[in-house]
Image: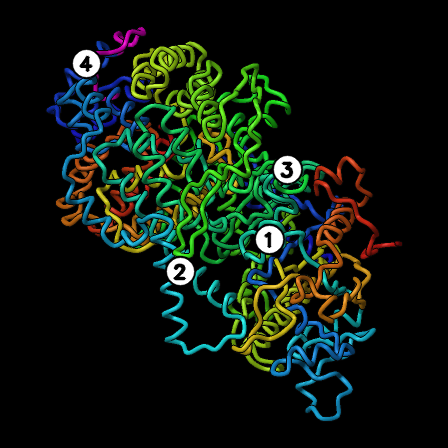
Amino acid sequence: MKRFVTFVLTAVCAASMGCSKTSVSAPAVSENRAQVVVAAGAGYSGATPRILDQHQRFHLLSRFTFGPTVESMRRLEELGLEGWLNEQLAVANSPNAELDQALDPYKKALGTPGDLVRLYQYDATTRLKQHGEQSSNLPEFERLVRNTDTIEMLRDLQMVELTRHLLSTLQIQEVMVDLWTNHFNVYARKDRVSFATSDYLERAIRPHALGRFTDLLEATARHPAMLQYLDNARNRTPSSTGGSGVNENYARELLELHTVGVAAGYTQKDVSAAAHILTGWSVENTTEGEFGFLFRTAWHTNQPQTVLGRTFSATGIHQGEDLLRWLAIHPATARHVAAKLCTRFVADTPPSSCVQAASEAFLATEGDLTTVLRAIVNDESFWLSHHQMVKTPLDFLMSATRAVGGVPDGGHNLAKNLDHLGQPLLFNRVPTGYPTDAASWASTHGMMARFRFATRFASGLVGVRLPTPSVFAGADTPIALQEIVEEKFPVAALHPEMLDAFVEPLLAVERAERRPMLAISMLVASAEFQRK
Amino acid sequence: MTTFLLSRRTVLQGFGLSLSGLTFHAESHGAQEGCTCLVFVSLRGGLDGLNAVIPYLDSRYYQLRPGIALAAPHARTASAHSKALPLESGYGLHPALADLLPAFRSKELAIVHAVGTRDGSRSHFQAQDAMEMGCTPDEHSDGWLARLSSLLTPSSALLHAVSFGGGLSTALRGIPHPVVVADLETFSVRNLRGINNLQDVLERNYRHAQGPAAGAGRRALQAIGQLRTISERIPSSAGEYPHHLRPLSELARLIRADVGLRLATVNIGGWDTHSRQGGATGLLAKNLSHMASGLATFRRDLGENGQRVVVVAATEFGRTAAQNASGGTDHGRGSILLVMGGDVRGGKVYGDFPGLKEDQLENGRDLAVTTDLRTVFAEVSERVLHRRLSATEADALLPGFSPTRRLGLFGAS
């Protein structure tokens, strides 16, 4: 039982001080542990820690990755904070055979809008022939067939994203992809957006997730997914429609959600002017099914417009480009985006000092996102915020799967489980994207769904292939199991109450092979696992 | 009946759970406060209203649907079981809906015809959103029942809003503390092979846990405990429900348990009949008979609780007026809607039937929508609130909606 005592001791320290060194790789010398804890605790006075202790590593990985794993904990320890950040932010692709293999079943969903339209319309036509249907209402029937395929395609696409989130070693990039996918939300089930979302993620979001905000903004603005989702594809000058007004949908969200935010104090006149500037930003319609970006000159208002006191006089498409570039580095945008990032990484209501630091980094570099992220990591409020946030359903699902080394099984079950947890990926109708705050996710039914998930997860029913041999191989005795849990689950920063609750039932389960299931269920369902 | 009520309450008080200072008293909620429980049944997939409630006096109906039309009640050529059942004023009921006829005749069931949303996309997802949100996504992001709930007296009942199915229904999205129930019988966290005390383990874990998820977790565990107690103590229905209507059986148990349930949603799918939908028999007939039998059993199950339960069953759109070459119908517009219980002024088909001539059809192909679904939502809301909605409330609940006229589904019109 000596081992167990050690476990409890470290857990108590972790819970009460948020700064313990639990034993992942260090030898279990419990006598010395308390001193380490005290020393690390003293180091929490504010300055950015250069050498991270176990708990700080866990904290960093809980926020900037989709969940700490034994491997990521080791890598961070090896490289140190700076080295790890450098590696992550350089976004250099290294071969990842495990990821490639896991992605393979879902790759059909990757392609340009035209590729996917052709692929799925071709499918529909072939199927029609196979069925020998002579429908009087062929377009309708085709649409039916296509709709069925579209959901398969979108499930594949969800799985592509989830698989990357799980297995990519460039975890900060993955987290940022998720953040921007929500910041620049599109609803993948709206009309033709379904065919464009894959390309949107691939070419508008991913390449710029850790690049410059300007590039991200421009790429989303001219992407058919966004143009269709927020209707700018139909935004034309009143003179070309015989008097009906411009479509302000995208222009409004551009100001309110994507760039300056409501705090900038713009008015309806500004929204209207921005909408006029963006008239003609549309999509092509070819018989081959392509619908890439197309600037329709005849739809453009082509008059100088004033937005937030700045007049844009360029002609044609240049007027919109000027607007986007100006908005992208506007001080209000810097603050709005900084607040968004701090809300994601530091706290539901982040301290203004942190937002200020991130905002200044944004302005100083004209929106270089890696610099902004470094500013957040270097802010003391980040290091003081451990355990204060609640995982979103996506965080929860990813971190549970990563903790046990699970890999998607080639089906769609994992994506469907995320639906059940309340956050269907890419299927959010509202342009705000999914929230990340505790109030939105720590709900009765949300927690019921997590409990239900925990039991299904442990029973292997969520579309995840667990590694063989199991992470729990050799856990023949409760003590051995504890040791493995302690080693394999960095979340072993647990309450003593939890350990009491955890160990007794474990001892009571006679058949040793069933203990891992209970252990996994407990860990995943525990109050501690919901926090990050 | 009184004895039964008392004993049931005693039973339920017996499981007042105590967790970390949060004490739950399962006292009687509904009957005491005269609360109405609103059950919203979402008939997903697009129910063919024209073959459910048949406008047999309209000769165009028979021209457009030669292969799938139902014979008029008085038709001499047809055999008895293949004819529509007479309702009133030129409407006939699909014979597969015969189980609903007693409720219609005793005026506990009202039908609205040519009803629908404003959404003309004919897309399942968009039209379902329009129906369950009661607005467009630009207007609100939550469901219409969630907004209705904010007009009700705040409830402390754990099970005040329950969504049956795999996830939270759109209609309830945004409501504080809803509960999602997949299946009462199997719903518990004990349900893990070989391990029978995970719930206890979690309760101990959450009892002293900190942080915002901990409070929600405790509440969730209480809800799970309460559901388990109900499933153990309240007998399940004696009546038979078709398999996919089992949620109605579970719902009836929750209502009979009298734990303060006020809003519930249930989904019944299978209406997307693009091919071979059949006439008096076949695909649609089978699904209609399941629905009718399920709703009729539900009504019997509720017994006298039925007085405080209003059921609204609606679909996102109807189907094309004409059959297609596959013997089915495609996505259309207007359909039917059912309102049952809660002293509805039943025995009547409400709404204006717009006719089936080409110029009467929407886009020349679909039964036009002459009654906005939200007319029904507004009247049902007033029934649940026991008062009229103010203009401000109506606009918050159903933005931009101004009823041209009331249907008068409840009370004195």
Subunit ID for the residue under disc 2: A
Question: Mark 4 sits on what residue?
Answer: A51
Q: Which mark is residue B265?
A: 1
Q: Nearer the viewer, mark 2 or mark 1?
A: 2
Q: Which residue sits at x=15%, y=35%? A: A94
Subunit ID for the residue under disc 3: A
Q: Which residue sits at x=59%, y=45%? A: B172
Q: Nearer the viewer, residue B325 or B123?
A: B325
Instruction: Tell me residue A7's x, y (percent).
Output: 22, 27
Q: Identify which amino acid the numbered label 3 is placed on.
A: Ser
Give the mark nearer the N terminus: 2 vs 4.
4
Q: Nearer the viewer, mark 2 or mark 4?
A: 2
Question: Mark 3 sits on what residue?
Answer: A239
Q: Identify which amino acid the numbered label 1 is placed on.
A: Thr
Q: Which residues are magenta?
A: A41-55
The answer to if A242 sits in the magenta stretch is: no
* Same chain? Circles 2 and 3: yes
Question: Mark 2 sits on what residue?
Answer: A149
* Same chain? Circles 2 and 1: no
Q: Nearer the viewer, mark 2 or mark 3?
A: 3
* Same chain? Circles 1 and 3: no
Q: Identify which amino acid the numbered label 4 is placed on.
A: Ile
